């Protein structure tokens, strides 16, 4: 991950396996971590429509062996609710212990890294990757010039944005072409698409969902490229003219 140093957490379907140990409050992969606690995974619920070839629905739920007490080093994150909107340019942060560049491992002492990247609208992301590659279950983030991105080893980690003093998880690190390449943003599972599914799988102590609302206009609506449907947005004036013509 091309970025700086931090603390945070989440999981994609491609990372789910029995025997997994989850570490919380951990800052470094090497040396002492006095504030870290670990839990084993006792149950994995993979999304039934996960596609390992396209990475669509790249999400799963993990049940830990026991509860965890929140403190200054371990705290929950809100999940983006189904009515959330993430316009192009919304600032987001991604954390992980993955590579800091293509073929470049995280150097010792392997501190947790973070990188700030803006959301890239799905229309633009489809133009970058190919129209059939990006689905509504995905959200993209990165710079058109490249240079900042999640990378190999960050998969399953969180992409979060802050609003009203709360961190809200918008995505889960899923896939990309290389790392931090121009016009090839990172692709993440879009958490807001899964509120109904998540709640259907958890009978008690359901996670907290929060609506992220973007302000201004969505510049992604004006993006067009070969194979992409032209976006048509009806305004009140258009509707008014249509009614006049019909009458």
Image (cartoon, rainbow, N blue to C red):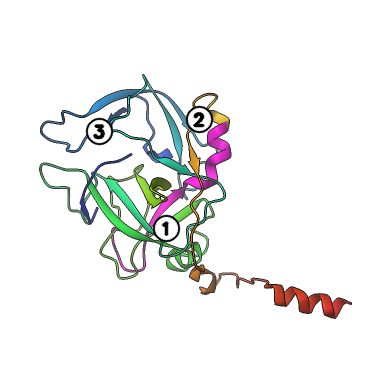
Label 3: element kind: loop
**Residue 183 falls in image quadrant:** bottom left
Residue extending farthest to the top is 66
Q: Residue at x 57, y 50 (%)?
A: 83
Alpha carbon distance from label 1 to label 2: 27 Å
| Circle 2 residue | 206
Q: In this view, does 35 lie to the left or right of 133?
A: left
Q: Which of marks 3 and 1 is nearer the N terminus?
A: 3
Per the rendered image, the range of residues in magenta is: 178-199
Quadrant location of the C terminus in the rendered image: bottom right
Circle 1/circle 2 CB separation < 8 Å: no
Q: Which residue is drawn at 56% across and 71% down?
A: 227
Label 1: element kind: strand
Circle 3/circle 2 CB separation < 8 Å: no
Residue 28 x, y percent position in the rendering = 17, 38
Is residue 19 or residue 188 the one in the foreground? 188
Q: Is residue 48 left or right of residue 68?
A: right
Is residue 229 or residue 76 the one in the foreground? 76
Q: In this view, does 5 lie to the left or right of 53?
A: left
Q: Which mark is residue 140?
A: 1
Pair 3/1: label in front: 3
Q: Is residue 51 visible?
A: no
| Circle 3 residue | 25
Label 2: element kind: loop
Residue 205, compared with residue 241, is above or below; it is above
Q: Earlier in the sequence, mark 1 or mark 2?
A: 1
Q: Which residue is drawn at 54% across and 29% down?
A: 201
């Amino acid at each position: 991950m091309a970025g700086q140093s931090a603390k945070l957490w989440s999981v994609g379907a491609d990372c789910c396996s029995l025997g997994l140990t989850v570490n919380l409050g951990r800052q470094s992969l090497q040396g002492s971590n006095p504030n870290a606690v670990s839990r084993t995974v006792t149950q994995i619920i993979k999304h039934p429509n996960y596609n390992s070839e396209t990475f669509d629905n790249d999400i799963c739920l993990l049940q830990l062996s026991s509860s965890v007490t929140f403190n200054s080093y371990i705290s929950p994150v809100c999940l983006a609710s189904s009515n959330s909107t993430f316009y192009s340019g919304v600032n987001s942060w991604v954390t992980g212990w993955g590579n800091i560049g293509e073929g470049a491992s995280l150097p010792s002492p392997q501190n947790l890294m973070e990188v700030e990247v803006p959301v890239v609208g799905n229309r633009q992301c489809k133009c970058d990757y190919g129209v059939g590659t990006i689905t509504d279950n995905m959200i993209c983030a990165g710079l058109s010039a490249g240079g900042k991105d999640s990378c190999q080893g960050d998969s399953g980690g969180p992409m979060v944005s802050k609003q009203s003093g709360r961190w809200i998880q918008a995505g889960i690190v899923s896939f990309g072409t290389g790392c931090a390449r121009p016009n090839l943003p990172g692709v993440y599972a879009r958490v807001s698409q899964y509120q109904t599914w998540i709640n259907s799988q958890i009978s008690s102590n359901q996670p907290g969902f929060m609506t992220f609302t973007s302000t201004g206009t969505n510049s992604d609506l004006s993006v067009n490229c070969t194979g992409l449907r032209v976006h048509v947005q009806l305004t009140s004036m258009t509707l008014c003219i249509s009614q006049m013509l019909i009458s």
